Image (cartoon, grey):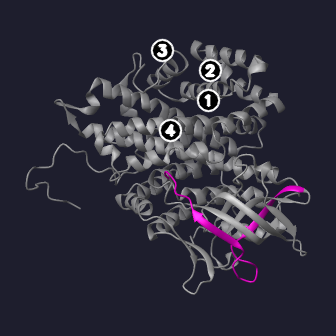
């Protein structure tokens, strides 16, 4: 649509075009290269098609609408009966339908006629999620949880099989009817309670036998996102200890289960996705996994959601960098394009290093999920899932702020993409384990399974032997690990160094030298810095920005 550029008092000029109608896949050189290398080459055409669809101005506007017209909790119907229904704007459902059609909720688990899953399935799915998160992050929550619930439901085939059949359908069904009558379904999760938060062992929700193999659950959850999911995995205390239960929205007879939403959370970001406080008033549910082993039962779901946290944060980092490069390439200040101003190009190039590192690290992690039968890949998944989530999700908010500043006041207002992206950025660092929780998880892996750390570090050795910066980083890591009395105190430093070593190793192997040298010189050596562009050394900013530019 074209608008008149002449207003009564002035002409509108020197503004960058609105960011849209861009193929989010083919315009991203790093994503294309990484997906091909990590096992997703067969899906290139499908990803190009999805990138065009998601990058259209129409789809970006659906994301705006879904966040401007927020979910509404309809606790009662007009006659006073409880319905506990959350009403979403139609734009939200349209985006959900796009991601469902791409299989972002199920594709790694789909089997062909011979019962084989697609090669590189997790990498391919993550490429789609990387793009979907750029358009609208809120809908990714139920998408993520539905994909992640599959290995948990497989623990209990007698209960999970009918649900799994529904999950494997790519036709989105938003109707609020019993799950067994729907074409497809979504599954959510509720673990945290007011008194415990991360410490789920402190949960007080009770599960009492119903006499038919099922349970009646009474208690609450402080955070339960995506309340319109068709069922939820929750943790509650049964006679044998903390156990995992599948709790449907509707009972087997079609009536509503006793899941009563108290309110929707008034969140900083991720606003299109309703998050609720909920009470269970004798809600009917079925145990999944062994009694008293609720955390081990649900841990695979948590692990897969952590992968998605890293992927979607990396995707958002790409979005804000691409927007900043796009804007500064069109905006003239002091007779020069902003991107040609030395200080601005240094800031953008410095940001690009973290975006490329985050992308490579996230998809290397995705590849490990595709090859868990390989002990080396299983070790990478176990150790590097919390490491990757920690580092990528931690650096994302600061990068988003710096990108927003490239726009000046245009970035701070809610009219464009930048303000919403900035508000969305902190979520993934908090969801499914905040920073300290990730570090404690890494330390537990090291203590319980030292060979896991050895396997991962061995993968750095060949590259480090050829680069003194990586070797110095490895030496420092070994020194920190040897100080057994300060492991927890140094937890964050250890995890960040692991992330930098992994990212640096990947960049050294797969990125152009101007990228890898600049990253290693500024992240593993060089002057201490607190902001982007403060220690860029002799960085080839033009080459770096050309590689990351979304402008063909």
For the point 65% across and 50% down, the residue is: 305
- Label pair 2/3, CB-CB below 8 angstroms: no
281 vs 239, left or right, is left
Using the image as rendered, state which of residue 514 and residue 203 is in the foreground: 203
Of helix, strand and loop, which one carries label 4?
Answer: helix
Q: Residues within 10 Å of mark 3 (few under 14, many from 20)?
A: few
Task: Give x and y (percent) for residue 399.
Answer: 45, 35
Q: Which mark is residue 463?
A: 2
**Above or below — where is 177 with respect to 31?**
below
Q: Residue at x 81, y 29 (%)?
A: 447
> Disc 4 to disc 3, how far (Cα)?
21 Å
Q: Quadrant of residue 388?
A: top right
User: Which badge, 4 or 3, comes first in the chain's sequence?
Assistant: 4
Secondary structure at badge 1 equals helix
Which tag, 3 or 1, sits closer to the chain's start? Answer: 1
User: Looking at the picture, does residue 228 appear above or below residue 410?
Assistant: below
Please state the horizontal and vertical placement of residue 35, each as a whole percent of the image: 55, 43
Mark 4, Cα crowd under 10 Å, few <14 / some 14-19 / many 20+, is many
Q: Which residue is mark 4?
A: 396
In the rendered structure, the answer to whether residue 63 lies left or right of residue 447 reads left
Q: Which mark is residue 527?
A: 3
Residue numbers of the magenta segment? 241-269
Q: Nearer the viewer, residue 50 or 75?
A: 75
- Between 420 and 370, the one lying in front of the other is 420
Asked whether residue 263 is drawn in magenta, I would say: yes
Residue 411 falls left or right of residue 397: left
Q: Determine which residue is flagged by label 1.
A: 499
């Amino acid at each position: 649509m074209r608008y008149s550029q002449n207003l009564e008092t002035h002409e509108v000029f020197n503004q960058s075009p609105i960011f849209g109608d861009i193929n989010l896949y083919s315009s991203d050189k790093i994503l294309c290269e990484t997906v091909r290398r990590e096992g997703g080459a067969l899906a290139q055409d499908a990803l190009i098609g999805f990138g065009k669809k998601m990058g259209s101005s129409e789809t970006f506007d659906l994301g705006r609408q879904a966040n401007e017209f927020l979910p509404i909790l309809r606790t009662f119907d007009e006659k006073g009966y409880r319905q506990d229904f959350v009403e979403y704007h139609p734009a939200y459902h349209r985006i959900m339908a796009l991601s469902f059609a791409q299989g972002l909720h199920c594709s790694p688990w789909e089997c062909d006629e011979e019962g084989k899953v697609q090669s590189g399935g997790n990498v391919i799915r993550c490429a789609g999620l990387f793009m979907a998160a750029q358009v609208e992050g809120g809908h990714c929550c139920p998408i993520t949880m539905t994909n992640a619930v599959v290995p948990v439901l497989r623990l209990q085939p007698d209960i999970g099989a009918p649900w799994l059949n529904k999950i494997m359908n790519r036709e989105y069904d938003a109707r609020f009817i019993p799950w067994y009558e729907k074409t497809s379904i979504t599954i959510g999760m509720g673990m945290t309670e007011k008194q415990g938060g991360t410490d789920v062992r402190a949960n007080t929700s009770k599960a009492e036998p119903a006499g038919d193999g099922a349970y009646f659950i009474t208690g609450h959850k402080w955070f339960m996102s995506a309340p319109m999911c068709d069922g939820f995995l929750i943790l509650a205390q049964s006679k044998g200890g903390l156990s995992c239960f599948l709790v449907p929205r509707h009972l087997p007879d079609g009536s509503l289960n006793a899941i009563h939403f108290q309110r929707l959370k008034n969140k900083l970001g991720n606003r299109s996705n309703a998050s609720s406080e909920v009470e269970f008033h004798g809600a009917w549910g079925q145990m999944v996994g062994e009694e008293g082993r609720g955390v081990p039962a649900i841990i695979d779901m948590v692990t897969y959601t952590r992968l998605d946290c890293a992927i979607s944060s990396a995707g958002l980092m790409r979005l804000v960098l691409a927007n900043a490069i796009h804007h500064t390439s069109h905006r003239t200040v002091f007779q020069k394009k902003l991107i040609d101003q030395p200080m601005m190009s240094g800031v953008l190039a410095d940001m690009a290093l973290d975006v490329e590192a985050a992308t490579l690290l996230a998809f290397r992690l995705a590849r490990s999920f595709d090859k868990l039968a390989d002990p080396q890949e299983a070790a990478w998944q176990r150790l590097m899932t919390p490491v990757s989530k920690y580092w990528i999700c931690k650096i994302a908010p600061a990068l988003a702020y710096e990108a927003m500043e490239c726009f000046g006041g245009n970035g701070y207002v809610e009219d464009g993409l930048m303000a919403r992206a900035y508000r969305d950025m902190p979520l993934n660092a908090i969801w499914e384990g905040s920073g300290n929780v990730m570090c404690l998880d890494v330390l537990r892996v090291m203590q319980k399974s030292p060979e896991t750390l050895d396997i991962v570090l061995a993968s750095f050795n060949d590259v480090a032997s050829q680069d003194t910066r990586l070797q110095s980083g490895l030496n420092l890591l070994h020194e920190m690990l040897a100080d057994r009395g300060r492991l927890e105190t140094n937890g964050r430093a250890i995890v960040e160094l692991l992330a930098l070593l992994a990212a640096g190793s990947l960049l050294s192997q797969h990125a152009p030298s101007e990228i890898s040298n600049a990253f290693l010189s500024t992240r593993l050596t060089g002057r201490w810095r607190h902001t982007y562009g403060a220690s860029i050394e002799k960085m080839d900013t033009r080459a770096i920005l050309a590689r990351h530019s979304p402008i063909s």
